[in-house]
Image (spheres, rainbow, N blue to C red):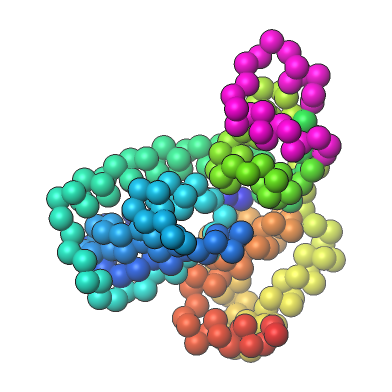
């Protein structure tokens, strides 16, 4: 399951919050968006800022976020306000694309097989199509294609999703749940770790996170557990996160 940043940003904007939204991408890249009374006043990732940083961050659909309300020494101006509106309009469109990708692909653990003969038909292919198809030389997990395509995560997933829609690829192993014994083991281990920090409410906390993902426990595949962890970690405070990290060492 994938997601755009639209919902998270919309919440901050509507509440007119001031602070920093920290974003950690699955590739270990990170970025931050600074808000002043609900207006985006600065976007950074690595050595990139503003438009270049925004283009990179808004192409991420697998990430962990944490918003910290704090003083931001940048005052919003009319240009920032107009740019914030443009960003949200853009992310609104991306949100629909991401929903379609999630429906088609399920998650990064799915295996995709590319039909070369179909790709050699009269259909026209873009440069991005050719770059993605070049690394789909054999059935591969989506996460492996993402690592090798040299394109952004969103662009690569859009191409794969379009290949599936047009019959140029198929899911060799779709979004399939793990064996029940494995699912029980994973949930048991997760609950045990959280119980060290939260006590008896850990089980309820996990159930609420599953509900937020709209998944029953017996439907979980490997990539869903990663997103479940993202969802849970976003709701923990700094001390709780540190305690969990220490337990897992």
Quadrant in which residue 133 is drawn: top right
Residue 62 percent coordinates (x, y): 57, 55
Q: Which residue is drawn at 21% across and 45% down?
A: 82
Quadrant in which residue 19 is drawn: bottom left
Tell me: residue 230, above or below residue 96.
below
Is 135 a magenta residue? yes
Q: Residue at x 18, y 49 (%)?
A: 79
Q: For the C terminus, which image quadrant?
A: bottom right
Residue sitting at the far front: 47
Q: How many labels, in total? A: 0
Tell me: residue 161, above or below residue 148.
above
Q: Is residue 77 left or right of residue 13?
A: left
Q: Which residue is drawn at 47% across and 50% down?
A: 56
Is any atom of residue 144 visible in this view?
yes
Q: Nearer the viewer, residue 9 or 60?
A: 60
- Magenta stretch? 115-139
Q: Residue at x 59, y 24 (%)?
A: 126
Residue sitting at the far left: 78
Q: Which of 67 and 55 is in front in this view?
A: 55
Q: In this view, does 242 lie to the left or right of 38?
A: right
Q: Which of 249 and 95 is in front in this view?
A: 249
Residue 87 percent coordinates (x, y): 33, 45
Is 181 a magenta residue? no
Q: Which of 112 and 231 is in front in this view?
A: 112
Is any atom of residue 210 visible in this view?
no
Q: In this view, does 136 lie to the left or right of 241?
A: right
Residue 52 percent coordinates (x, y): 40, 49
Tell me: residue 232, above or below residue 171.
below
Tell me: residue 181, above or below residue 237.
above
Q: Is residue 219 left or right of residue 11?
A: right
């Amino acid at each position: 399951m994938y997601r755009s940043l639209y919902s998270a940003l919309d919440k901050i904007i509507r509440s007119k919050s001031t602070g920093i939204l920290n974003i950690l991408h699955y590739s270990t890249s990170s970025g931050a968006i600074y808000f002043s009374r609900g207006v985006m006043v600065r976007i950074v990732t690595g050595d990139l800022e503003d438009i270049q940083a925004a283009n990179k961050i808004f192409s991420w659909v697998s990430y962990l976020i944490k918003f910290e309300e704090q003083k931001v020494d940048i005052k919003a101006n009319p240009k920032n306000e107009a740019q914030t509106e443009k960003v949200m309009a853009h992310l609104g469109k991306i949100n629909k694309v991401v929903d379609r990708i999630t429906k088609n692909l399920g998650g990064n653990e799915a295996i995709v097989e590319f039909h070369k003969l179909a790709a050699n038909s009269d259909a026209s292919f873009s440069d991005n199509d050719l770059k993605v198809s070049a690394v789909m030389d054999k059935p591969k997990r989506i996460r492996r294609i993402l690592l090798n395509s040299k394109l952004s995560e969103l662009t690569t997933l859009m191409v794969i999703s379009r290949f599936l829609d047009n019959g140029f690829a198929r899911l060799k192993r779709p979004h399939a749940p793990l064996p029940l014994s494995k699912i029980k083991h994973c949930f048991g281990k997760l609950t045990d770790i959280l119980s060290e920090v939260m006590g008896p409410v850990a089980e309820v906390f996990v159930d609420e996170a599953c509900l937020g993902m709209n998944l029953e426990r017996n439907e979980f595949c490997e990539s869903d557990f990663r997103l479940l962890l993202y969802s849970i970690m976003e709701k923990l405070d700094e001390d709780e996160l540190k305690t969990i990290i220490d337990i897992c060492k």
